[in-house]
Amino acid sequence: MNRLLLVVLAGFIVFQACRKDKVGYTPTPYTLKVPSHFPQMPIPADNPMTEEGVMLGRRLFYETKLSLDNSISCASCHAPENAFSDPNALSAGVNGTLGTRNSMALVNLGWQNRFFWDGRVSTLEEQILQPVPNPVEMHQEWVQAISKLKADESYRNQFYQAFGTADFDSTHVSKAIAQFLRTMISGTSKFDVMYKHENSLVLTPSEQQLYSTVTPEEWAGYDLFKSLNGADCFHCHNGPLMQVQKYSNNGLDATFTDLGRGAITGNPNENGKFKVPTLRNIALTAPYMHDGRFATLDDVIEHYSTGIHQSSTIDPLIEFASQGGVQLDAEQRQLLKAFLLTLTDEHFVTNPDFQPLNP
Amino acid sequence: MRYILTICICSLVLASCKKKKDDAETVADPDTLTVNVQPVFGASPLVLDQTYALNDSTGIQFTDIKFFMSNASSGGTVKKDYSLFDYRNTSSLLFTIPGVSSDFTELNALIGVPASVNHSDPAAFPAASALNISNADDMHWAWSFGYIFIKVEARADTIPDGIPLFDHTLTYHVGSDAFSGAVSFPDLNWTAASTHHSVSTLHLNMEQFINRAASPINIRTEVITHSNAGQEALTAKVLSNFIAALTAP
């Protein structure tokens, strides 16, 4: 009789084990706050947004255990006080080892289809996997990083709540951080109400109020920004994201020390091209360009005014390259800068949901 | 005997909770049609960034070719509402739709975007629509001017001295409601790519685009249009040459 009970019990256990719809965790769907003038954000089917995943990703974003000597986290090179960028031209990894490029500001990443300055990966989840083992960044094998996280019971619980497993790996870490990064949406700057007004989109009362503060200088700067015979910026910095999804050689050098996109594709026609970055929060994300060569916005404006270098792959949209640039005078430069400052989104940079959980 | 019975019951339970195989294996693939556009220079497929010689020994390198096609129809039925051709990023593909070639014998369409939707919020179109700003990307002007209907960008070497120096840029951006144009191909040729997939390929002859006999583009003087006021003549020429260069062989 006992053996009969044992067999029935074993069958019951096997039956329960193969019921996949009763796994015992109940993640809560996360509702993204997408501005009305933004397109729908594409979310990967294998990484749906959940409250638990976002919270875990937020914790991991600030987690120094991801680095070899527990000294740096994602936020070390994407600091919230710098609109999630690095104030240093080149970011320092473990032991102060310098990389070769400036850390890109993290904003509106859910709408990007290529990541890094050279666009070498096409998903946010893939991007997040790279800095941990990179010798000039966190310099730690994923196995070691995961081992450190698994030693912490609170992480085991959080991963279980987010993904239904305590036996997590690097893919779960990248998914969680990706979920957090997708929540980092900037769409409430003064520029946004200017954009909505220009496109005849309805402004909310608070947006109306913000709109009333736009100065004539800022409007004049916007006109210059869009003008073919002015600053001519709009070809690459366009739409609600303030960027287009392409690689461009914007005339920084006549010869290339960093091949950029060309190093990835092996196509010499792409040498010296880099991903076009967004201009959102641009006043807060100095220094500028892929190598952080320009310390100020004035330096950047000077480059496009008189500092363009011709080369074999220069973007045809740098339309005044043969003259060295768009030749803005002092007043035009001030107006353009006034417009660029409208891209600062105070709500975004001070949003408590993006700050460390235990500062 | 009771043990055998119990084991049988357990086996049945286990078998019943195994996930069923996908029945889709037995369903036939749906019929699909693909319309491609193959840019050519003369008789050869055009390669972006590659140098081609124009009649006057000028060298030209095309760097981008994009355009919108709207309301692609056959027999009065719209087969595809909006599609975006982007040679650099999606190669020769214009669109793929469900259907069979016998129902798509001709192609009538608009090169551009109808005025009725040209100034709508580009974020409001469905995510899969070519007009959604995520897909249109740099084919939209962000201040309600609407979509860029045709984009041809190139570099030229205008000094035939044997020294390759492609420092002469050409930027042809056609848009605004006045500069869309109709195309009509009464006999589409379909080729079976597989049992349930047929392909029809249009040609876009970029040599003809520049050197069209009726209205050649002088790349030394006609170098830029963004369809602004004062650029109407070149904008119209670019549009008409582009349409003339598009053929259904």
Image: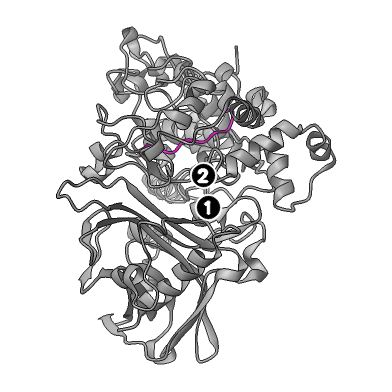
How dense is the environment of label 1, judged by Cα within 10 Å: few (below 14), some, or many (20 and up)?
Answer: many
Q: List x then y, in percent, for residue A272.
A: 30, 36
Q: What subunit carries mark 1?
A: B
Q: Nearer the viewer, residue B74 or A150?
A: B74
Q: Nearer the viewer, residue A194 or A220?
A: A220
Q: What subunit carries mark 2?
A: A
Is residue B132 shown to the viewer in this render? yes
- State which region is magenta: A274-281
In the image, what residue occupies the spot 33% across and 49% down? B168
Q: List x then y, in percent, for residue A277.
A: 47, 35
Residue B58 quadrant: bottom left
| Residue on which disc 2 sits | A111
Q: Amino acid at mark 2?
A: Trp
Residue B45 quadrant: bottom left
Q: List x then y, in percent, for residue B249.
A: 29, 84
Please determine whether, in this image, residue A62 is positioned above or below residue A308.
Answer: above
Q: Nearer the viewer, residue A82 or B233?
A: B233
Please determine whether, in this image, residue B29 is positioned above or below residue A191.
Answer: below
| Residue on which disc 1 sits | B134
Provide the secondary structure element on which disc 2 rests: helix
